[in-house]
Amino acid sequence: MINLEQPTVKSTKMDIGSKIKFFRIQKGLKQDDLARGIISVSYLSKIENNLTSPSEEVLRLLCERLEVSLIEQQDDTILQELMSWYKLMTTSESQEIKRRYEGLVKKIQSVNTKTYMYFVLFELRYHLYLKNMEQSRALIEKLQQFLDIFDIHMHYYFQKFHSIYEYRLNNFVQALEHLKVAEQLLQRNSNLEKSEEADLYYLFGLTYSQTMKEPLSITYTTKALQEFQAIYDFKRSAECQVLLGICYRRIGEYDRSEKSYLLAQKLSESLNDMYLQSLIYHNLGKLYSIQGQHVEAINEYEKSYFLKQQDRPLSKLTSIYCILLEYDKLRDYTECRKWLTLGQDLLSDSEDAIEYHYYFSIHECILEGDYVKFDQIFLEQALPYFQEKDLKEPLIIYAERLAQYFEASYKYKKASYYYSLGYKELKKQIFL
């Protein structure tokens, strides 16, 4: 449990007791292993909790057993490098992030305790950036051992990064819990930069959006946008406009949604950011689709498709799938077949993107008019997967499609089951 009543700023030097505890945990020693033959376990516990100071002789013996020296110099240069590396992770996608990590790993062996702690914290952010969830979990468990010797900055970063970890796992309620603690710590700490505050607000906006709490998402995203605009961070401002556009679309404010997307588009074009432009075109497609403007939606989805990077072919799948859905609504089955084949070709040698295997298998059945097979694939394979991954939208789309088919075939029991399934998911989405 974090003590939010701790001082806003701790000393930049860790207390001797905290250092002893840090190195003991690093060595994998229990308290009785370190204390044996030197002092009692209870006395060591008092030292580690900074309730008492050891004599020089006791300190010497403890250091010998730990094979360390507690005389440290402040590594301000490396600490600055760490902060610069962390900022790069929040603003960029480049090989430079990996290159800096490799350089810091070589330097970190000789740095002091505090700097090492920051390295492990930012290493966690690095693996989250790469979506290496196993490594991230291991680092979280490692850092949890040091919670009671963190200063307030370290607590803040740990809570923030833990929220990102939970977000990546779609555990949005848990992510919000960590964000709220981080926000409390941020409010008690005036030393963090405005960009850090803005980034935290943006994470709130993202997470509230995932839980369908659009008013809260709009509130936090607007705060983030104002902060990013104040420091002339155009890329992050554009990301905020995209998120606002999504929120406005979900609450039926289509004009405001389009305005946000078009503002984001201007910024992305000035930055020549292809990824961001592709994202904006995709969301404009969704906006036009929900208004029944299927031709306009296809135009936007196609723009997004052609901007996707050639070296990441699987990134095109979302665009292909959305275009396929629009042509299906227009009953243009020739174009449906064309885009379905494109999608299937991308998946031919891939174990990734399991959901798209289900989407394309289902649409193959639809084009062939084989609703018996569609029903079988959906019930036995796709539905359990959609429920496990909390993929509400495809579940609703295909449940409704099957309900309409079985209703038209006078199979009312089956139709009722699928209507009920779709309604339950839709109700969750609206009232979550």
Image (cartoon, rainbow, N blue to C red):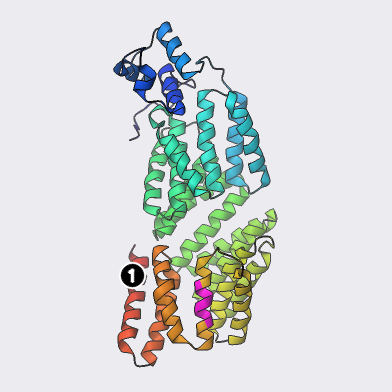
Q: Quadrant of the C terminus?
A: bottom left
Which residue shows up at 51% across the image and 18% down it?
A: 68
Tell me which residue sits at (58%, 50%) in the image. 236
Magenta stretch: dominant secondary structure: helix
Measured along the vertical axis of the image, is residue 375 above or below residue 179?
A: below
**Quarter that holds the N terminus:** top left
Residue 186 visible within the image: no
Spot occupied by residue 131 in the image (x, y as percentages of width and height): 53, 50
Location of mark 1 (residue): 427
Where's residue 372, x and y in %?
A: 43, 86
Quarter of the image where one finds residue 145: top left
Magenta span has 311?
no
Does residue 375 appear left or right of residue 230 in this picture? left
Label 1 secondary element = helix
Q: In this view, does 111 lie above or below 338?
A: above
Q: Where is residue 392 in the image (x, y as percent from the top left)?
A: 41, 68
Evaluate whether residue 271 shows in this view.
yes
Q: In the image, 404: left or right of 202?
A: left
Front in this rendered view, residue 268 or 414: 414
Q: Is residue 421 above or below residue 98?
A: below
> Which of the two residues, 220 or 183, is positioned nearer the viewer here?
183
Residue type at mark 1 is Lys
Residue 411 as seen in the image, left or right of residue 189: left
Residue 362 magenta-highlighted: yes
What is the magenta range?
358-364
Q: Residues within 10 Å of mark 1 (few under 14, many from 20)?
A: few
